[in-house]
Image (cartoon, grey):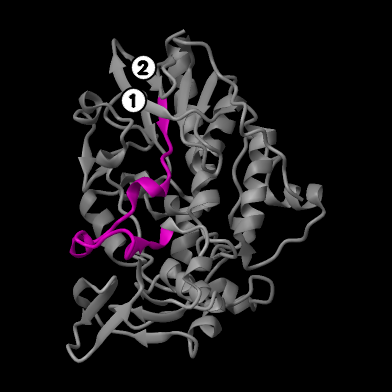
Amino acid sequence: MNVSVDMKKPQHSTPTSEYDVVVVGAGPYGLSTAAHLQGRGLKVAIFGKPLKLWREHMPKGMLLRSYWWATNLSDPEKKYGLEQYFQAEGQHESDPFLIETFIDYGLWFQKHAVPHVDETYVKTIERKEGQFLVTLVDGRVVRAPAVVMAPGLNYYVYRPAEYDHMPDELVSHTGDHPSFDRFAGKHVVVIGGGQSALETAALLNECGAEVQLVTRSPLRWLSGNSMHDRTFIRRLKAPKAGIAPGWFNWGLEYFPYTFQRLPRSAKNRLLRGRASYGPAGAHWLYDRIIGKVSLHELQRVQEIKEVDGGATLTLSNNDVVLKADHVFLGTGYRADIKKLPMLHPSLLSEIQTYAGAPVLNNRFETNITGLYFVGFSTVLSCGPLFRFVVGTDAAARRVGGAVARQAASVK
């Protein structure tokens, strides 16, 4: 089942080499976009470690909340989807979907669709004389008229300011841990009520930790309706969609570029409302949480301090004080391109932003010609579809077409 990928011998380009486009990042969005760019006959350089976030920052045994058929990476000929992977590897589809299977699929996709990934990291990106100069950590310089930024979520970890004074040994983000084995027998507190927080709590409990969960709102559970046995009426009321059943989600998927055209005020209303996809857990987590984990719903952490090598948390109900060997923050991610260290200050200062995220047109392009973003960075401009892997196809197709037209115009 395991795909063998040579991760020790990246294919290096020569110093100061010329490309049509550089893709920075080799996660689902970076790989999919690179596949579409290559499919258009462009000379593409892609830098990054394939599926690094998934391989190094997601815990073993994690299950994906999304349906397997909504977790395809995208290539222009539709040759390397999960259905083809299952057939090639002699596997069968399943929901929920193990992260190990998704990682193996992603590496299989990379091997076949984007075989020439250079795992060297990008040090700086700057713009000179209408071209982007991409300097790698090994000193090589690559030049291209277009750059596609596909940064991983690890750049955008959100850690509320009230925890800044606490050491990393006592407080960490749920995305920092590929394994929870070392917390067996420990007393831990998980903050948050979203999928990441709930699954972290479940996995910690199953590793033998004593877990307490603190949430600002009552726990909310997503429907467990199977896509295969839904009645006609249910399908009519809530059609099949990659994010979740429903007409709104269906519209996001089948009209993926409409959100970007809305005025800012309308986008904000949607992102605060039905497009917020607020904290909720998959139905299959219910039995792994209820009765297994101590719950403190409708509570906030009023104070946290280090005491005797551990953490002491005072909740908004002042009668409740929790003591923990470690605290996990399931506080999500917030796009802020100032956190991307490879963007040269001179370039960063020119990029138009809103709430830290790049302002993009309907081609996923910034106000700087030739500079594109895909993935989580694009949500505030282009819509919540691009929080999820199901959005890779729409983003990759649109960016592929835009960069190809740009390349043709300068030749």
Quarter of the rendering containing residue 332: bottom left
- Which mark is first along the chain, 2 or 1? 1
Q: Is residue 357 above or below residue 63?
A: above
Q: Is residue 116 above or below residue 216?
A: above
Q: At label 1, which amino acid type do we have?
A: Thr
Q: Badge 2 local density, few (<14 within 10 Å), some, or many (20+)?
A: many
Residue at the (54%, 59%) spot, across then down: 242
Give whichever of 101, 167 is nearer the camera. Answer: 167
Of the two numbered discs 1 and 2 in the rendering, the one whose residue sits closer to the viewer:
1
Q: Is residue 409 above or below residue 201?
A: above
Q: SS at mark 1?
A: strand
Q: Range of the magenta residues?
A: 147-175
How far across and down, in percent of the image, does residue 199 sit? 49, 71
How far across and down, in percent of the image, does residue 386 sit? 43, 50
**Cα–Cα gap, marks 1 and 2:** 8 Å
| Label placed on residue 139 | none
- Tag 1 residue: 124
Residue at the (42%, 10%) spot, across then down: 410
Whether residue 367 is visible to the viewer of this picture, yes or no, is yes
Residue at the (53%, 22%) spot, across then down: 44
Q: At label 2, which amino acid type do we have?
A: Leu
Give whichever of 132, 225 is nearer the camera. Answer: 132
Q: Check contact, mark 1 vs mark 2: CB within 8 A.
A: yes
How far across and down, in percent of the image, does residue 389 sit? 52, 51
Q: Is residue 358 above or below residue 46?
A: below
Name the residue furthest front.
Answer: 308
- Tag 2 residue: 133
- Whether residue 305 is in magenta: the answer is no
